[in-house]
Amino acid sequence: MKQPRRSAVHSESGSPFVSGRLGLGLLLYLLLVGLMPSAAYASQCRVSLSQPTVDYGVIRRAELLGEQSGHPQFSLGHRTLRLTVDCADETPMAIRFTGVPAGTRGFRFGRDGHFILNLQQAQVDGRDVELRSLYRPDESAKGRLLPGVVLCTQAGGAPVSGRRLTALVSIDTYLPASGLAVGNETSLEGRGSVERVPCA
């Protein structure tokens, strides 16, 4: 059978990009775009991720079915990026991800899939901090970026300010079994922006 042709997918300059392709019918993209919510914030801080492209590589539908047979959904694997926020002045640090919600699970990937984002090993100016939501601390205990959630840097229950925030961003992407039932090469996307925002 003829192998699907690999394609290079380009993102805008500075836009972190996660991609992959599922052979025999599925082409997958997941974009994480480092953006600021306003011009004022953009002039004060810069948000970046460690690499603009993460490629899942060639993923064959038959292999997924063989490796994860009987599961209600299929994992496309775990990826990790490094998030950095650099600010000109000392400032409170808070992060959110804005994308199409997939219920309470995470963010939409294609029509039926979803991806989950977690922030781990966060530090402000080299000091270990926690990332918690002011209003949903139970759901943010592990640094999960959920729709509508802002994660604030804290230490000992108090807000932490600084000039530089670093953290690992873990990405887990899932498709339901029905998402593999395609006859032709199909594009699926999950888009959104990682933003530094006020802790409020």
Image (tube, helix red, strand yellow):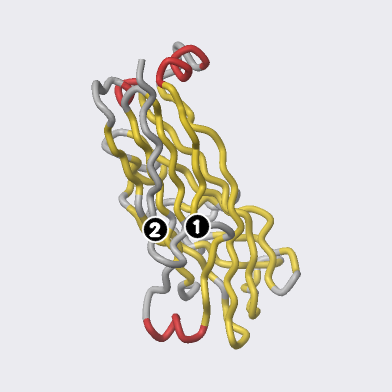
- Contact, CB < 8 Å: mark 1 with mark 2? yes
Q: Quadrant of residue 93?
A: bottom right
Residue drawn 35% across the image and 47% down it: 190
Q: Residues within 10 Å of mark 1 (few under 14, many from 20)?
A: many
User: In the depicted view, which residue is nearer to us: 153 or 188?
Assistant: 188
Q: Residues within 10 Å of mark 2 (few under 14, many from 20)?
A: some
Residue drawn 46% across the image and 86% down it: 43
Which residue carries the number 2 mark?
A: 11
Q: In whole angstroms, how far apart are the C-alphas of marks 1 and 2?
A: 8 Å
At label 2, the amino acid type is Ser
At label 1, the amino acid type is Pro
Name the quarter where the N terminus is drawn: top left
Q: Quadrant of residue 39?
A: bottom left
Residue 52, relative to residue 70: is it above or below? below
x, y percentage for residue 176? Answer: 36, 26
- SS class of the residue under badge 2? loop
Residue 180, relative to residue 170: is it above or below? above
- SS class of the residue under badge 1? loop
x, y percentage for residue 187? Answer: 29, 38
Q: Earlier in the sequence, mark 1 or mark 2?
A: 2
The tag on residue 52 is 1
